[in-house]
Amino acid sequence: MKQVVLKAPKMSCGHCKARVEGAAGALAGVESVNADPESKNVEITYDEGQVDLEAIKEAIAAAGYPVE
């Protein structure tokens, strides 16, 4: 398992948190997602054998929250 912290500057509320967590969490191989609107951080734990970081970033961006 790999853990990464991404920044989602547009995330600002509970609805944003739910969208980001739902988008990343729906991917096979993503074990956990914890989005924090206050810090703009998105902590993700995932299995590199099932999903890559680029796919996770794309899923979150497709939900309207590009990550850095």
Image (tube, helix red, strand yellow):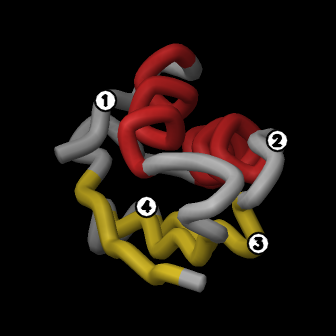
Three-letter code, disc 4 = Pro
| Relative vertical location of residue 2 with respect to residue 9 in this rendering, above or below | below
Please name the residue that numbered disc 4 is placed on: 37
Q: Earlier in the sequence, mark 3 or mark 1?
A: 3
Could you give the CA–CA distance between mark 1 and mark 2, rounded to whole angstroms? 17 Å
**In the drawing, what numbered circle is on residue 31?**
3
Three-letter code, disc 3 = Glu
Residue at image position (47%, 74%) is: 43
Q: Earlier in the sequence, mark 2 or mark 3?
A: 2
Residue at image position (64%, 69%) is: 47
Q: Earlier in the sequence, mark 4 or mark 1?
A: 4
Please name the residue that numbered disc 1 is placed on: 66
Mark 3 residue crowding within 10 angstroms, few (<14) / some (14–19) / many (20+): some
Residue at image position (69%, 36%) is: 23
Could you give the CA–CA distance between mark 3 and mark 1, rounded to whole angstroms? 20 Å
**In the drawing, what numbered circle is on residue 26?**
2
**In the drawing, what numbered circle is on residue 50?**
none
Task: Give the label, 3 or 1, closer to the camera.
Answer: 3
Q: Earlier in the sequence, mark 4 or mark 2?
A: 2
Q: As rendered, which of 31 and 68 lies closer to the eye?
A: 31
Horizontal and vertical percent position of residue 59: 56, 28
Could you give the CA–CA distance between mark 2 and mark 3, rounded to whole angstroms? 10 Å
Three-letter code, disc 2 = Ala
Could you give the CA–CA distance between mark 4 and mark 1, rounded to whole angstroms? 14 Å
Task: Give the label, 4 or 3, closer to the camera.
Answer: 3
Secondary structure of the residue carrying tag 4 is: loop
Secondary structure of the residue carrying tag 1 is: loop
